[in-house]
Amino acid sequence: MNDYEFLLKSDIPDCSKACLRCDVTCPINDCRQWIDYEEDLNCTAIAVKKNGSMSLREVADRMHVSFVRIKQIEDKTLIKIKKRLAKRFSFRGEELREFLLTAFGAYSGKSSTKGHDRDASKDDQKQE
């Protein structure tokens, strides 16, 4: 058995667990989780569970693209998330920024003067 027995108890896909048990790289290269990175047994699920949070450079190495390209993808993804949150919760400008900082554990340093507006929008969603 390999050094990653803790992964067998995690919520990774069964195919990833099979690769771990046999200590072989994933042979199914058309799988959505497959990456060309043998150190992580060619599996993104294993890579994430084994390494935890990774830097953009670590992701770039695994994906065989440049750090700049990973940064571009991250930026585009964050813009999409912000737009969807703004639309879904009717946030604007500073209110959305404050929500995101709070949601991800960061402190904005400013007190919310419109917190009651957020609560009202949540109540509206529940009624729908």
Image (cartoon, rainbow, N blue to C red):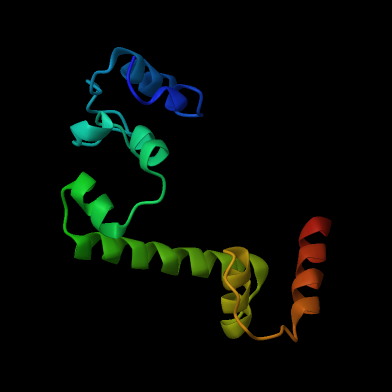
107 w.r.t. 1: above or below: below
Q: Give the quadrant of residue 39.
A: top left
Location of the C terminus by quadrant is bottom right
The percent coordinates of residue 25 (x first, y second) are: 23, 23
Q: Give the quadrant of residue 100.
A: bottom right
The percent coordinates of residue 95 (x first, y second) are: 63, 80
Q: Residue at x 76, y 60 (%)?
A: 125
Left or right, 81 with respect to 60, comes to: right
Left or right, 9 with respect to 111, comes to: left
78 w.r.t. 23: above or below: below
29 w.r.t. 73: above or below: above
Location of the N terminus by quadrant is top left
Left or right, 11 with respect to 88, comes to: left
Q: Residue at x 24, y 57 (%)?
A: 57
> How many numbered tags mark residues here?
0
73 w.r.t. 50: above or below: below
Left or right, 35 with respect to 14, comes to: left
Q: Is residue 128 visible?
A: no
* Residue at the limit of the structure toward the front, as seen here: 3
Q: Residue at x 30, y 32 (%)?
A: 43
Q: Give the quadrant of residue 127.
A: bottom right
Camera-nearest residue between 91 and 112: 112
The percent coordinates of residue 90 (x first, y second) are: 65, 73
Q: Is residue 89 visible?
A: yes
